[in-house]
Every structure is written in C-alpha cells, then in structure tokens.
Image: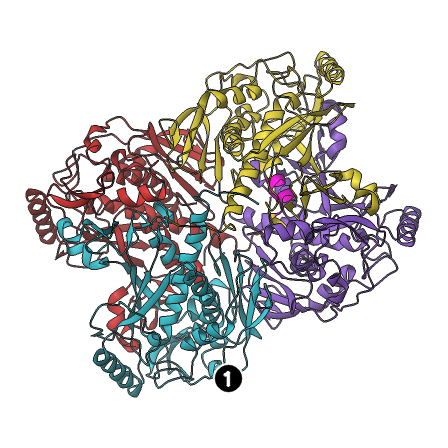
Chain colours: A yellow, B purple, C red, D cyan
C-alpha cells in the first residue's frame, strides 16, 4: 500500500497535516531492543520546524507519544505505534486555494485522484509534516543499526547552484548548517536568504553515506539496494532525482575510468575507488553506500503565480501565504538519513534469512 | 521477493545466463486480451544482441515460448509464463575469472551473498540477458496500454559526453539509432566505436516519456509514480541514476522557475511547462510522464584491470574477453520502455480499484 | 507482516492489552465514503465486554478516536487510523503468572519467541481485546459492503455440545443471544452458566453468511475466498477450525450428494443446493458464502491447573483469577462478521481490477 | 497474487491442464543447498496419476525439468523454475461441456470471472494437475526441513464415513494405502471401489503432523501458523475444511479438558496433551503441529446431473466422462505434506529474522 514501506520491517505512515494526529506503525522490530527516547528526540529536532532563519515558523514540538510496541522503553515484539498530535494548525491559511490548485503542489492531482474528497488543509497526507513519523521510524532504525556497527551520515551537497566542497567522511549532524565546507554552507545560506527576500524558494541536493555495512546485503534485480532506497527516498516530498556512486556522471565515463579495481587492505578485499557507491548487482560490496537525492524548490512561494479556478474553469492568479520554508533542504537532511536507515535495516533483516542459524532455541 | 515486481500485475523473472532457459511469469493480466505475438517479437528484437556494430556478437533469436496463460493467443486469466531457451552459451569464456572478480560486475558481491554457491557462468542471474524476459512482460503491457490510449516513447539522451538535441516528442523505435537529432546520434556512434577500438566501454542516458496518461494514477508517499518506476528501473543492470522532469537540474532552480503554472487548453487543465515530469505528489497530472535513467559504462572491458585472487588472497590482473557490448545503452532503450510499461500498467490496475463500478455482473 | 491483513484494503492492528492504546490503521479505503460513526459504535458494542452475564466484567466503552483518514466523517483517501485508549487495566492481576505460563494461552510461546521481552500484562498483543480494532475496520467495511448490496449475518451455531436449530437466513444482531432458535439459545446460556459456576469455560461454533455477493469474486489457488477468509479468521484468538459450506461433513458424502446442481431461477443461474458454501474454485458463485469457525473454550479458568515455573524449572500449580469470559463465543459473533467483511471487501476491490473502466477521468 | 504463496520463500504456480506445460517458480531458497532429485522424484510419484485402482488412468510421468535456480543440482540463490510438459491431453473429452458447467467444478465461476476467456480444457488453471508443481516446491522444502530436524508425516484419516484408527506417529509414505490401521484402510478402499462402481465419487480427510519443530515459529494475529497453513492448504482443490489440534471437537469441550497442562520432560517444557495442535497464539509450542483437511468428493462423476446450458439459458443434463479419480484423497496426501512443508519452511525463514546473528561476513 502506498503509505507503507518494507518487507521485513514494515512501517505505515498515517495522518494529515491538520488531522488530530500524525503517526507511524512499525512492524517487524526485533523484541528486546531498548530505544533511547532522548536520543530519538534529538534526532527528531533536526527535522522539526521553527528552529532557524531558513525554516517555516510553524512551531511544534514533534514529541511522539508511544501507544504500543514498547514495554518500559524496550521493544516487546508487538507493532510499535507512535503519534504526534497536531496542535498548531491554521486551516484558514489554506481556504483561499480551495478551488485554485497551487502550482508544484499535489492539490490538483489529489483532487482528481480522490474525486474532490481529499483533505486539502495544509496539504493533507501530502504535507511535508508527514516526514516526522518517517523520522520516528528511521530514528529507531538508526539506533538498531548502530548496534550492528553501521552509521549513516549526510550533508547538503548543493543549494541553488552552490555546491559543497570536500568529501563526506563524518557526520554533520552537530553543525548549525550541515555542510562539509563551512564557506560553502555560508554561501548556501545566503542563497536561501536571497530567495526568501524575493518571496521565492530554492532547491538542493542531499548526499548520504552508509558506513560499516557488511558486504552481501541487497538482492539482484528489483531487490537491489538501489531499488530499495529509491522506493523510500522518492516518498520524501520534493525528491525528483536520485543517484548512486558516480550516478549521472558515470554515464559520461569510460568503463576503465568507472570500474572500481579490487585491492587488498589489511587482509580485506576493498575497492580502490567507489564509483559504484558501494553497490554492485544490487548488493553491497562493503564499501560506503553513497547516494544523492535532488530536491526541487519548495513550491509554496509568495510570488504571484498563474493557475486555474477549477470551479469556474477560468484562469486565476494566486500568491501562497502561510508559513513556509524558502528551502526545505536543511530540514530534509535527517529525513534522508531516516529513509536510508529504514531501507538498510529492512535489507539487514532480509539478509538474516540467508545466514545459518546454529540453534533454534 | 527480489526477482518480482508489481502489486496488481506481478512479474517474476527467472533464469541464469547459462541455465537451460530464462523466462518470466506474469500474474494479474486481465483475461480476454489478445496478444499480438509478431508485434511482441519486433519489440524484443530491438533489445536482442548481435544486430549491430555496437552490440555483442552473441547471437540468439530471443524467441519466447509461451507455456501458460494464453488460449489461442488470448490471455485466459491464468498466470502467463514465457521462456527463452539458452542455446548459444560458451561457459569457457568465464572459467578464467572463477576466483578473480571482475571490477564493476556483481562477481564479488554475489560470491559473498551466496557463500560461493552462485552460478557464475555468464553473470548468472545478474546477466543483462535477464532483461529479455522483462521485455516480454513489458512488451505485453505496451500492447495493453495502447488499448487505453497510452504510448511510451524513448531515446538515447546522451552517450559518453555527447548529448542528443531537441525534445522527445515521438517514437524513435523505427530509427537505426534512437536519437531525436541524427547528427547527435552519429557523434554518439563515433564515441562508441572509439571506446570499442580502445578495448573500453562507455555509458549513457536514456530518456523515456509516457504519453496519454490520465491524471490520478499513482499514490502519495511510497506509492508515488517516481517510487514505482524507480523500483523497477533500478532493476535494469547498470542503471545508477534516475530523475523525473527537471530532476537534478531542479535542485538549482527557484520555485518561481520550477513550478508549472496551470492553464486551460481546449477546456482541459494542463500545465504551461512540465518541470514536474507529469507527477505531483506521486500522482500523474495528465502531462507526459518524463524520466531519465543513467547507465554506467559496461564493466566488461578488454583493457587490463586490477583485481584480487580470492583463493590465494593476492593481487591479480585480468582482461575480460568474451563477447560484450562496448555500450549497452542502445539495447537498453526498449528495456527502459518495458520497465516503464510494467510500472504504469500496474498503477493503472491500482487506479481501477478507486473507480466506481456500475454493475458487478 | 503478522498484524496486517489484506492486499487492496490493508489493515494493521496495533496495541497491547495494557499499552496506552490499541488501534488500527486501514489503507486503501475509497475516498468520498461517509462513515456512520453511530452505526459503527452500535456494531462495536456487540463485541464490547461487560454487557452480560456471560462476559468479562472489565468494562470499557470501546469508543474509537479517529486520528486520520476522515474529513468531516467522510473518507479522504489517506490511511484511516482509529485508537481506543486502555483505561481500565489492572496489571496486578497478571503478576502472579510472570514465570508460570497459563495452559492454553500464548504465555509460553510468546516468551520463547520474544526471548522474554514480550509484554505479558493482560496477554499483551495476543489479548482478545485486540479484536476491538479489527471490529472498527470490519464495521467500516460492513457499511461499504451494504452500499454494494452485500450483507453479512451470523449466529452462534453451537456452544458446548448444544447446537442451534434452523437455517441462518436473517441477522441475529438485534437478539439478546444470537441464535436462530430461541430454545437452543437458552440451552447454550445454561451451558455457559454451568461452566462459570464450576470455574470452567466452554467453546463453541460461529456460523457466518455473506449475502448478495456477485459471482466472480476471489481467485484460483491461494487467492480463493476460502484462503482469504481463513487468513483473517484464524487471526481471531481461539479459532481452531474453519469450514465452508458442507465442510467436514462433505468428506463423508458422495459426489452425487455434495455437488450442487445448476438451475435457472428468474433468469438467473443459481444452484439448487449450496454445499459449496457459495465458493467453487475459490470464486464466488453468487450463492450465499457460508462458513463456520470453531472456537476453543477460553483458556482462562479458575480451576487449578498444572504448569511449570520457568524460572526454577519445576512443576507448579496455578489458578487464573482476573475477569474472564466463561465463553468467548457470544462476543466473537461480531468479530467473525468484521473479519468476513474485511476479507470480502478486499476481494471486491481486487475484482475491480478486472472490470472494464469506461473512462479514466 | 492468487497463484503465489509465501513471504520469505515465495512460490508461483503456473500452467493450465492442457497448456504446453505447468510449473513453479520458487524464490528465496537458500543458496548452496543440494537437491536430491531422485528423492524428489519419488515424492512426486506418490501424487502422480495412473498408479492404482482408485486413481485416474491419465498416465503422465510428472518428471520435472529444471530451467533455472540450480547449478549442478545445488541451489545457486537465483529463482528456481521447474516445469512439467503436458503431453497426454485429450481436450476432446471436455468439448461437450463447453457451455454446460459441471456441478461442483469451477466451470461456472471461472466463466463469470474471466468473462468467458478462461481456458476450459481439463479444468485449466483450476485443475488438480496443478498440485504437481506445488509438490515440486514442497518436496524441495521437505528436504530442507529434514536438514533442520523437521519431519512431516500424514495419513488418510477418513474416507466416506470410514475413519482410520490409532494415532499418527510415523510416516505412512511407504504404505500402499496410507492409513495407520490396515483394516481401516481396506474398508476405505472398499468405499472407493463402491463409489466408482456406481459412477460416483467420495470425499475424505487427510491428517498431517509436523514433527521436530522448534518452539517460537509463527506470529500473533494474521501471521499465526494456522493462518499460514490455511492460506496454502485451502489452495489445494476440493479442500473445504481445516482444523488444528482438537479443532471442531474443542468447541464442545470445557477449558479444563481442552487446556494442555505444561510438564517437564528430560528438562524440556512440553505439554501433557496436545489439543492445541502444537500452536498457541499462532506460535509453535514445540509439540507436534497437527491439522486435518477435509476434502469434498471429486465433483467429476459419471452419474447424470442437472445443469444449465449457458448459451441457450435452458436446463440441461450432463454426465462427466473422461478419466477421473473416484476419490482424490489418496493422491492428496503428499500434496498436503507439500503444502505444509512450504508453509513451515516459510515460517522458519521468518524466524531467522528474529535470531541474533554472530557475524555478518
């Protein structure tokens, strides 16, 4: 189903921007795993709105309530459900567009799909706010992965035309602005400020790396790590492109340039380069799994735009008011990590099926 | 499972490069649909090897035998299975690499995953040859889609650094080399010839457009058209990147540039531009659905490469002999169409569940 | 996943007996369908505890709160989530059995499965209380089915050795005790009272019929209506047997007795008898779909039983106190209807994929 | 999809009675497992027709050809596909009923479902012949289970009204007629012979036990062992009832009679009785998993029956000629074992996801 993801770990996201609550159910978590709720809260705060100059001023704590699946903060084997109440909703902001679809949003397509019965307030189930429950699930997976020696790090690789410099080797989570190069980060912030000042918005690219992965995860064909990650990352609103390793750049390379030679290092087989992004034949090689996701600019802009009044079927103009991010990319960084964590942990559970079990009891 | 795709139409691809046969089972095809086997054969021939200067000289007819699911060439509601016998296999070509994984191939990752039990001959289940059964399923879906007024067209958008010119508006299937601009196509062929002459290979980009789609197909979140298409397209060997509409370029745009304004045309709501690639909130807008897939250069190259002998755990050199495509992209064009056809037809069947049925009998 | 059911309509049940809440998420509901919440509440009350002499005295209102999926009580296309808070929990009742598994319960098997991390209080996720969220989902499906002309009725067919008399032709939902024959019902109640007086419990059989079904629902093989209904009905705690139409009795019949001859009635093809229970080859025939589910006696009994102390690994005795139903069957009747409704509605959505759509927009 | 089963091991059955071939694809088999093809062949022969007085005289070898998934008779990790050619087809036998549906068969329901496009010859995809591919998959699973110390045994528990005597403790596979009690078996054979002589057929019950199962397999709710087994066993043609442990008899018992007390034996926790059939809360207890499946009498009988001519919509008589089993039950015994093997092995793979893995490489 469309709001669910995963074969072995399965999450289902529910809620609309202005429904009583949003939330997530996660099935398939192993029993007996303690969840550090404070650490999870810190992770959620990286995504939460209202923290900075470049984000929406809608301020909500994003504090999940756990309804099931935990027993004294330890997973008990039953499905885990966590919800976040929607408290700070201003539906009035959206009444103006009831019949005038906002360009770049799902207003029009949702209306056609649901025959006009969709919940339009705040973007309904299409709202970026629904990435909060994804981060709850992903934040839990990040903790489980760490226990297996696996880390997920990411950075803003580009905003507008400005690119980050240097290689992604360590977490940027503690930084005010998650780039490797500080100067590049400042130029990106200037780009965002400029877009905001002009009543406009700007897009960007997030790069993510999974470190410490064992070789042998993922499957051939449609179960490849690329397929698994794509199937969840394209579920993050505004993602319109995805590439692994050298990605689109590989299309311009020769095989002799793009192939990663095998070498030995400390008795381990590794590759001298990592153009494959750590995936060959859909299966992890043991090298860092690296991907980049392209985010389109936030469609909500103050500038006047052309649209159509669907009631009168006549041309119309609209300016999108309300509280919006001029650039969603900084807040999207932990969401990408969360998505990657879910996909990788699901693949790790799948891999367990292939391992030999010494004793069943 | 990893060799299966689809929720409503479900295909399962089986076979190894050198097993007795390869094939596909398709469940969920509507009953009573005639399949034009000659048209299907012409479609398969666009992918088949041995046709041109830029393809492998391994020559096999790729003529499917239908084992089930048809009654006098009409679908009967039961699962359809078609197989292609593997006749022209030269396993000897591969014996040399038994313990030396070829860079850029799945040799090493498959060996780890399957604990050494994998079928290495010809790439086994990872072989590009497995795209033939995908094309059988896709070729059937293309026929079914056409009956709903939906066409899928594609072209080579780039090879090496050479880009095609002009917009993709019509099928290139009848062309010798599937580009919009003939001169660009010739430059690409020169690029391929050069790579071949140097014992090397080269990558490229395929662009695909789905025309005539109704608005309202696809779902929010993980059921979006991007997710659905990505989950199958990344199953084509060598695909390392995927973008929809403006894609990665959108990341550098302003919202005011990237948003597609709604306008009225002949009483229909359309968008003046199509940076979204016909998808908003995961759901089709009625505009052409446009995506591009990046293919890495074929990893099989004649040039000497560094690797490791996994038996002796010592450095090794290898040159990949055998019959290989210096550029897989021209043969990948119909494969991309096939993948798109399966994903779109599956989404169309999903859409049926949402439509009102007048009478059940 | 184990707490989820359905392909086209997908429900996920979450919660433990003593967790903050229990609930259900339903994906795939058609948009634009009004849900009559009062009617739903009346349906839930048929299952709710504390209503009668034969049920547990744990009294909770079972009033669902809808967190998502509705817009002014109309489905909006997004996943619907409803929860019921757990307020009246007395965990102390269960502390005594922390290490002594109750015979007939899941205590021991859950402990092995979850390595001791399971939530034991009140039976955790295994509690019969989890049938309340199933009834929310089923109650909604019942309303949707009624709009298609489909009704689901049921009755207690047997309790202890006492069998109901007469044929199930109309709803028993309004009756104090849901049997066709009043005298049989009174004998069953006497049987329950006797078991309760002896600190014991008793099992029974629920019969269910789906009326007004179109022919053509369901699929061959593993998608048969029997398979679909079994896959959900065996998820109701205590169900240990299931049969369709003549069921086990058919095993003792001749073909000439069991076959249902086709006849014409008012220009419609029907069968003169209905030993098949309205299903042939897994597919509905248009006759009433009839099945019976066998419930074992409630394992919670006041009588002293033998068990084992898992901590000391020594024999132990236990008496199960707390508030328990001496017979779960009366309260199980609407649960069986709910399960049938979900399975049938899911099959109805599947059938839509096979129907011809006149226009997509 | 309807012809597929399993989450971790997934099999897809294809073929029609008179299509070029029938077969099965199995995904998810562990790599590196040798398959004893001779042992598999002996297993298939227990199901094969033409062996005895009580079976159809249609004689086909049921010798599978393996198209993929094996490398020198060892699983290689890729999907395994095996086919059986249909050689001995006499479609003429069926032409007579083109428009007169046979009572008790899927003729009418298939016609409605597939709008008349179904393959009617020999029952098409609904034919009992399709249990041969199920037996290929099941026979392989039986070999894999044996390596884990798990055995599956079964017997004919009843035919017509005649019941077997004694407890099912050991395999009956080597017997001419698979009952525990020889005299009971002879009485059953007499029952079958009598039915055949009268141009009639007779039903029966198969009992199956899974021995050596570890505790902890299966899941709560819809993932219970009962649900899993039911979802496949009801896919065997003619099965109309299924019960676990005491099953329907439990409905007439008191809790104090039906509960299985825990005791210690050789330091292991077991139950003194096994009314639960080895399943509590959907999860295995370590006791034998026991179930019984009720088979209706073969609907194909020589006796004249009432039906309807669907072309003229008028009453019609028909006698079913051709070669049919007067009782399908003896040949169904290995099919039930095969179905159980697939369900149990799938649950075993699911259980692996919950076990701790010492090292990933």
Q: Chain of mark 1?
A: D
Observer-nearest residue: D174 or D123?
Answer: D174
Q: Residues within 10 Å of mark 1 (few under 14, many from 20)?
A: few
Please state the extent of the stretch shown in magenta in the rendering. A224-231
Q: Is residue A163 magenta?
A: no
Q: From the viewer's perspective, tell me whether residue A170 is left or right of residue A352.
A: right
In the image shown, does C247 or A276 lie closer to the viewer? A276
- Residue A311 appears in the picture as rendered: no
Residue B245, quarter of picture: top right
Q: Which residue is pictured at 48% across the width and 40% down the height?
A: A10
Which residue corresponds to mark 1? D92
In the image: residue B324, left or right of residue D124: right
Taking the magenta stretch, the answer to whether it contains residue A226 is yes
Residue A72 seen: yes
Where is the C terminus of chain B found, in terms of image quarters?
bottom left
Q: Position of residue B352 (x, y in %)?
A: 54, 49
Nearest the camera: D77 or C262? D77
């Amino acid at each position: 189903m469309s709001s669910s993801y995963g074969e072995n770990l399965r999450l289902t996201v529910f809620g609309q921007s202005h429904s009583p609550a949003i939330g997530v159910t996660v099935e398939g978590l192993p029993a007996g795993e303690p969840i550090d709720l404070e650490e999870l809260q810190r992770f959620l705060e990286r995504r939460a709105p209202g923290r900075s100059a470049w984000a929406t001023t809608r301020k909500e704590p994003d504090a999940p309530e756990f309804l099931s699946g935990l027993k004294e903060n330890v997973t008990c084997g039953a499905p885990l459900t966590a919800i976040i109440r929607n408290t700070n909703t201003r539906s009035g902001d959206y009444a103006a567009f009831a019949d005038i679809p906002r360009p770049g949003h799902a207003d029009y397509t949702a209306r056609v799909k649901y025959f006009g019965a969709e919940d339009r307030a705040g973007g309904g189930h299409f709202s970026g706010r629904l990435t909060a429950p994804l981060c709850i699930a992903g934040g839990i997976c990040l903790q489980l992965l760490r226990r297996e020696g696996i880390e997920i790090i990411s950075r803003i690789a580009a905003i507008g035309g400005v690119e980050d410099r240097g290689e992604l080797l360590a977490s940027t989570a503690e930084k005010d602005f998650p780039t490797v190069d500080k100067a590049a980060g400042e130029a990106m912030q200037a780009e965002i400020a400029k877009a905001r000042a002009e009543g406009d918005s700007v897009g960007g690219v997030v790069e993510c790396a999974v470190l410490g992965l064992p070789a042998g995860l993922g499957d051939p064909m449609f179960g490849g790590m690329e397929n698994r990650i794509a199937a969840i990352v394209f579920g993050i609103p505004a993602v319109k492109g995805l590439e692994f390793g050298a990605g689109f750049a590989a299309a311009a390379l020769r095989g002799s340039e793009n192939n990663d030679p095998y070498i030995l290092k400390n008795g381990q087989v590794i590759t001298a380069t990592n153009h494959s992004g750590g995936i060959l034949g859909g299966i992890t090689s043991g090298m860092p799994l690296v991907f980049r996701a392209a985010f389109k600019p936030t469609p909500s802009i103050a500038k006047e735009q052309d649209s159509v009044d669907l009631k009168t079927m006549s041309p119309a103009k609209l300016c999108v008011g309300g509280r919006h991010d001029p650039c969603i990319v900084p807040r999207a960084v932990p969401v990408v990590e969360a998505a990657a964590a879910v996909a990788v942990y699901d693949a790790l559970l799948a891999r367990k099926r292939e391992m030999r079990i010494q004793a069943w009891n």
